[in-house]
Image (tube, rainbow, N blue to C red):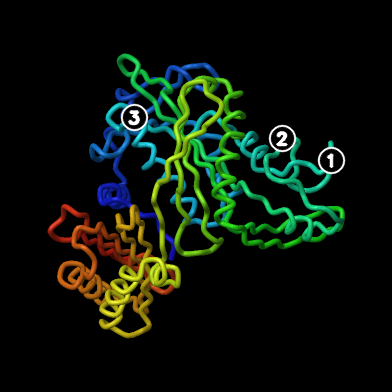
Amino acid sequence: MKRKALGLGLIMVMLLLVTTACTMPWSKDDNKQIVTDTPKGSKEQVTVIPQENGKDYRTIHSSKDSSTRGYITYGVNNRTDIDEIETGLMRLSKGTYDPDKYYFQSGQYISSDVINEMISRKPKGKKVKYPGENLKGLNPAFGSGSDIGKMAEDSPKELSYVLEQDYLTKKGKNQYKLGGISLAISMNSVYNQSIYYSETGKTYPVDVTLNAKDQMEKGKAYANKVLQRIRQIKGLENVPVFIGLYLESSPGYDSPGHFYSVGEVGAGKTTIDHWKATNEDNVLLPSDQAASKYPDYSDKFDTFQKSVKGYFSNNIGVIGNAFIKADKIQRLTINIHVPFYDETEIMSFTNYVSSLLQTKFPFDRNTPVEVYISNMTNQPESIIVKDADMDTPFVHVYQGSH
């Protein structure tokens, strides 16, 4: 089961929205604010959604959808990667854009057309001939030959996607202006694509594993190319830019990839020379990677997994994703699939897992944990959240969902 990691506050807000269908106070007309500089150079009326806590950004919400909303799925195949790219870039941006001073807004300046240009292939010649080529493409051209599938395999696409996030500052009363942007440069670890070629009427499946170290190094070169492109966009010529380099996981994998380097670009600069390693990782539990790279965490999760399965039988599926920074778990997300639907049994099992987090949890008690319990058809049954500052977990069982 693939789920986005959610903070307790956000979970409670979502539950409130679902159960009450209420109108939130920040949606009232008298709370409308103005963004003074937009991609079109005009003013725009927006809504400012307040912080849930001091660690989060206040959000600028526009009634007009960005042209790139949902466009990331054209480049990134794995849902877990999409979630990590979006939330991870925001998390890393806090080191550059202080949430007490900056407001978050989804990317407004880089259009879907520009993104498509960048993630497309360069043409083999002076004209576009093959599918996925673009005269402004940044990805390698097709390899030699006449078989599209073989040509793609011999020269796999390296750049997967470019994600933009905007960070605004307050400009007088109820007015906001762009203070800087963040970019995620997402690199393939596996090039997986089905290419339809109209000349033959056939579809060519391509699946190539790329060298991770090479891809991570190439990400730095792509970042400079992307930076030069975005400096040509009206409104982005002189703003500061924060860049995060991301290496994707394999398509369909239950654990995302990770941001591996970050860098900052001053106003008007078109190159970035200094990168800082993030020392971050995401690891699936259980997995061979976890057993070899983080054996202690692997053993502890195995202990917890056995405790959970001891409640009913081995038909209970338990997988986890550990977000690790500097070799220490920062967040543990656990997905549990149960073979029963009875509501009383769900409640009993949920309470059992909650008690394990308090009494028999093998990890550090201050480790933030989110547990998502679902049935075998992937319908959510309950959630359990325990943050570092909580004495007892927050528990919610969905009622009457069957």
Question: Label 1 amino acid?
Answer: Gly
Question: Label 2 amino acid?
Answer: Lys
Say which element carries label 3: strand
Residue 394 occupies which quadrant of the picture? bottom left
Graded by Cα atoms within 10 Å as few (under 14), some (14 to 19) or many (20 or more), the crowding at tag 2 reads some
Residue that appears at 75% across and 43% down: 133
The quarter of the rendered structure image containing the N terminus is: bottom left
Q: Nearer the viewer, residue 347 or 335?
A: 335
- Is residue 35 shown above or below 310? above
| Residue 61: % across, % down | 40, 32
Say which element carries label 2: loop
Residue that appears at 30% across and 55% down: 330
Q: Which residue is mark 2?
A: 136
Q: Residue furthest front?
A: 274
Sequence-earlier tag: 1 or 3:
3
Between circles 1 and 3, the one closer to the viewer is 1
Q: Which residue is mark 1?
A: 125
**Whether residue 124 can be seen here:** yes
